[in-house]
Image (cartoon, rainbow, N blue to C red):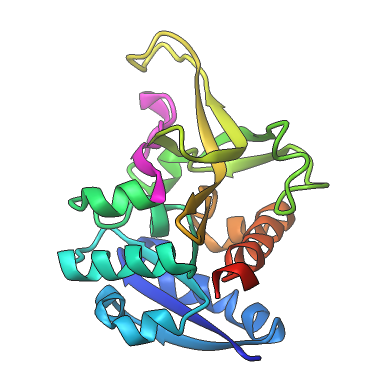
Amino acid sequence: MTLKALVVRGGWEGHQPVKATDMFIPFLERAGYEVRVEGSPEVYGDAGAMAATDLVLQCVTMSQITSEQVAGLRAAVEAGTGFTGWHGGIVDSYRASSDYLQLVGGQFATHPGKEPCERQGGQEDNYLPHTVEMTALGREHPITVGVEDFDLVTEQYWVLHDDLSDVLATTTHPVQPWHPWHRPITSPAIWTRQWGAGRVVVTTPGHSLDVLEHPSVRTVIERGILWASRTASAS
């Protein structure tokens, strides 16, 4: 049986949605997926297309979604369609839609920056050295088993989240004199979420192509694609 993957990409160009998703389309094809690519979430409103989709890989930062489109996405995931993505392409999408945010389980809040005197006005102002640390669950989960804690120098996402998610990895934001918080903040970095018969997988690293090429990041995303995809029990 041929699996069907839907790649939805667009939104803010800073995350290079076309080049970023193009990195994973060959992997999908090698894994036996027939891949459809769309440049907007309009397809989410097509119930027939969504019912036939085993996996949605989304990379749409910010942008807009209609109530009908998000309802279609939620219904498809509840019925068994997998949903996955990375960084702002999944947790900084459709900021005005609370129904979307509830489905994903995490909302980008900020990425703390360098000391103000070191900033030069570019994206690099927000590139900080940090560690992605596996949780006890993450050390056993099929997506992250065997993946050790790893270090990155890139945007470190602080996300608002809830207790429905199963957190596989975290990252901790330290206290700095130029920041207004007064204790270290630990934020989920990789998580899964069961929504009806469907599975959601979120990986927050992935701001730029070099981060997506990091062996640990790429491994987690590729395993997440396979794990999130519609299971036999959801067919």
Q: Against 29, is 204 above or below?
A: above
- Residue 118 in the image, given as x and y percentages of width and height: 42, 30
Residue 107 part of the magenta segment: yes
Q: Which residues are magenta?
A: 104-120
Residue 231 picture location, percent across and down: 62, 69
x and y, in percent, of residue 134 in the image: 70, 35
The residue closer to the viewer here, 206 or 32, is 32
The image quadrant where one finds the C terminus is bottom right
Residue 47 in magenta? no
| Residue at the limit of the structure toward the top, as seen here | 182
- Which residue, as the protein is rendered here, is positioned at the far right? 146
Rendered image quadrant of residue 60: bottom left
Question: Which residue appears at 46% of the width and 80% of the height?
Answer: 6
As rendered, which of 35 and 176 lies closer to the eye?
35
Whether residue 16 is visible: no
- Residue 202 position (above or below residue 38): above
Q: Residue at x 46, y 72 (%)?
A: 56
Viewed as shown, does residue 226 lie left or right of 109? right
Q: Is residue 228 left or right of residue 65?
A: right
Question: So how many labels did they put on this image?
Answer: 0
Residue 136 rendering spot, x and y as whole percentages = 73, 31
Quadrant the N terminus occupies:
bottom right
Q: Is residue 146 at least partly visible in the picture?
A: yes
Q: In the displayed structure, would residue 25 be above or below residue 106?
A: below
Residue at 59% x, 75% y is: 23
